[in-house]
Amino acid sequence: MYVIGLTGGIASGKSTVSSMLAKLGAYIIDTDKIAREVVMPKQPALLSIVAHFGNAIMLPDGNVDRKMLGNIIFQNPQERSCLEKMIHPYIEAEVNTCIKKAEQLGHKAVVIDVPLLFEAGWQSKVDEIWVVYVDPSVQLSRLISRNQLTNKEAMDRINSQLNITEKAKQSHLIIDNTLDIENTKHQVITAWQSICEKMNKIKV
Ligand SMILES: CC(C)(COP(=O)(O)OP(=O)(O)OC[C@H]1O[C@@H](n2cnc3c(N)ncnc32)[C@H](O)[C@@H]1O)[C@@H](O)C(=O)NCCC(=O)NCCS
Ligand SMILES: Nc1ncnc2c1ncn2[C@@H]1O[C@H](COP(=O)(O)OP(=O)(O)OP(=O)(O)O)[C@@H](O)[C@H]1O
């Protein structure tokens, strides 16, 4: 199995690029989605989260109050690290299961959409790293408008990750998502075609 790690900064456009790749036939493993699933009611990670952060972190419907948890961890690196230690092992296990599923379905390559690839030290888990880059000022404005955040809240989130320019330097391929969607789509098609060629044009 050939594993592509798709990463970038918060709101740099990973989901946008993932959807384009999915339309081209790529098998996508979305770690943000998995991170949401492993903290659903009755999941083991939820017990540790409540034990550490307290019942105040829960909504009346039994789900985690993601806004409140985000406000805590994006302002406090120690709390962020605690949360990651509780969740990341479950994410990693589920990613491995998804890779096996893709193999059974006959895929020769998978794309893992993983925002914290560098921060979590996943470089050795992947064969190739693609970074979705965006100009930092565009990143800030897209994040503020998508999540309805203040400038400070958005900067706290951006600063909780490795700098996007540094990520780009450590990648095998950069998809620059600063301009419009069509521009990005062209880059994604070219990138995926090169993977298909690499996989000897067999179903990927
Ligand atoms: C703090 C939480 C509850 C906020 O939830 P919310 O629904 O507002 O955001 P969502 O999960 O959609 O994440 C949005 C983006 O935030 C960034 N982000 C998420 N977690 C982190 C983190 N620990 N450190 C830095 N950036 C992060 C990523 O770029 C991600 O794409 C949530 O992000 C979370 O549980 N984070 C810890 C799990 C994790 O590390 N996820 C990243 C995937 S490996
Ligand atoms: N080329 C583009 N032009 C304009 N808006 C864009 C472009 N690409 C993405 N966006 C918008 O920017 C926001 C962030 O994009 P997206 O959700 O794909 O980022 P992400 O990297 O997956 O975010 P996260 O790290 O939070 O998971 C979204 O509101 C999206 O619609």
Image (cartoon, rainbow, N blue to C red):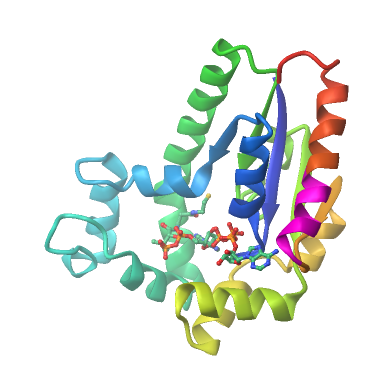
How many discs appear?
0
161 on left or right of 86: right
Type of secondary structure dominating the magenta stretch: helix
Span highlighted in magenta in the image: 180-188
Q: Position of residue 109 (x, y in %)?
A: 70, 24
Q: Quadrant of the C terminus?
A: top right
Please name whichever residue, 68 or 187, is drawn nearer the observer in this view of the structure.
Answer: 187
Q: Position of residue 134 (x, y in %)?
A: 75, 67
Residue 171: in sight, yes or no?
no
Residue at 72% across / 15% down in the picture? 203
Does 182 lie within the magenta span? yes
Specify the farthest residue to the left. 60
Q: Position of residue 102 (x, y in %)?
A: 57, 20
146 on left or right of 178: left
Does 58 lie within the magenta span? no
- The quadrant where ligand 2 appears is bottom right
Residue 152: in sight, yes or no?
yes
